[in-house]
Image: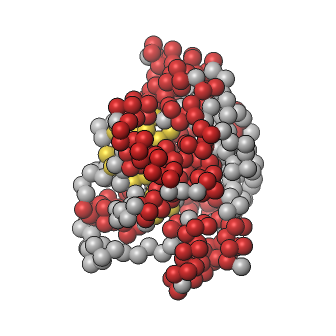
Amino acid sequence: QTLRILRHYRTLSISEQKNPNYLSFRRRIISMAEQSSDIASTLSSDMEAVSIAPSQPSSSTAGIEMSEEVEKRYKIVRSIGEECVQDEELKNLLAKKAAPICYDGFEPSGRMHIAQGVMKVINVNKLTSAGCRVKIWIADWFAQLNNKMGGDLKKIRVVGEYFQEIWKASGMNLDKVEFLWSSEEINARADKYWPLVMDIARKNKLPRITRCVTIMGRNDTDELTAAQILYPCMQCADIFFLEADICQLGMDQRKVNMLAREYCDDIKRKNKPIVLSHHMLPGLQQGQEKMSKSDPLSAIFMEDEEAEVNVKIKKAYCPPKIVQGNPCLEYIKFIILPWFDEFTVERNEEYGGNKTFKSFEEIAADYESGELHPGDLKKGLTNALNKILQPVRDHFKTDARAKNLLRQVKAYRVTK
């Protein structure tokens, strides 16, 4: 019965996993795992049980009292993650290491949407403010394996450079950030990289690897190329190759990050990479769990003109008095509030007058009660987004190199 429930769990979307019934199930499974090593073993093989196992302080963490400074750093880093595996390990890491290495990465695959742009700037700046070093892995070879930009490495390179221009223009703190091209780093240290990939591949069965293909935007039922089977083994190897203490990627990448933790068990390595998975911003249209680059109305792109932003937000799904599953409110929660520390709505006095909110709870309460109308919320969201994006627009209009990169990227056909 447990396995049947778990297999059903694997089909759930991230939003469905937040359902109170699922959370109750999660607690029940944790309790079962605590009572039976057999169940814990079964969970591990079928469902990456480490992701739902209770956080157990190691002998080195038990008794450690965090200083005020470490507590502050922990709160900053932890605020990034919708999920952290495991919290005690993160506290222990920050107590022992002044400059942990955080790994993030991306496939250069067309124009950059706002989650890749603004959310990454917010997260990276939080990490560096907490003393972390951030290694951003420009996964050009991975994009080629996954047939992005038609597998054309020259086009992929252009897109990678365009991404860097956006982050610089958006205010990313680059003092403790390294941009590393996967092709260059792997070629430079091939003797270390490929034996690691091979060992990960040898220690995992094919079904476990195919479960990870969702990291590429694929399904395990898709007809996969051999290259796409190799991809998860390589991404898992990246974590160790880059000597990462923390994997700071989206929830859609958690399966391969959990694979890395399982690999640590296989090789009897005590220090596992901490998985800090950030929230996935939904598309702007109803029922879109993720933004789609192939659907222009589903996402705000980082160099969208003011008029384009206005139209997209105007057409966005925003049901009155409903907070759950409302993409406009998610934009405010995960982009506007972290960026400005407030959200302002401008209204005529007869409709309540101008109001500045300092927390998402305030906004949600007014919206659910009907005090905050969708039209007013959308107007405030549009104004805030355009303020954030204006420096990026200016950069791509005034900087000759950036302008040329954008022209090329817009001309490319996006491939899946």
Q: Quadrant of the C terminus?
A: top right
Q: Is 55 above or below relative to 82? A: below
- Which residue is at 72% across, 73% downward? 4
Percent x, y of residue 380: 60, 43
Question: Would residue 261 be visible to someone looking at this image?
Answer: no
Number of numbered discs overlaid on the protein picture? 0
Q: Nearer the viewer, residue 162 or 56?
A: 56
Q: Is 35 above or below relative to 413? A: below
- Which residue is at 45% across, 13% downward? 400
- Which residue is at 58% across, 34% downward? 145
Is residue 153 left or right of 327 when viewed as pictured? left
- Which residue is at 52% across, 20% downward? 154
Q: Quadrant of the N terminus?
A: bottom right
Query: According to the image, what is the colour scheme of the structure?
Result: secondary structure
Work out which residue is located at the far front of the displayed protein and give it: 202
Is residue 224 left or right of 246 when viewed as pictured? right
Q: Is 88 above or below relative to 403? A: below
Q: Nearer the viewer, residue 146 or 87?
A: 146
Q: Nearer the viewer, residue 364 or 44?
A: 44
Percent x, y of residue 244: 36, 50
> Residue 309's quadrant in the figure?
top right
Percent x, y of residue 148: 61, 31
Percent x, y of residue 326: 68, 53
Is residue 77 left or right of 338 when viewed as pictured? left
Question: Would residue 34 be visible to someone looking at this image?
Answer: yes
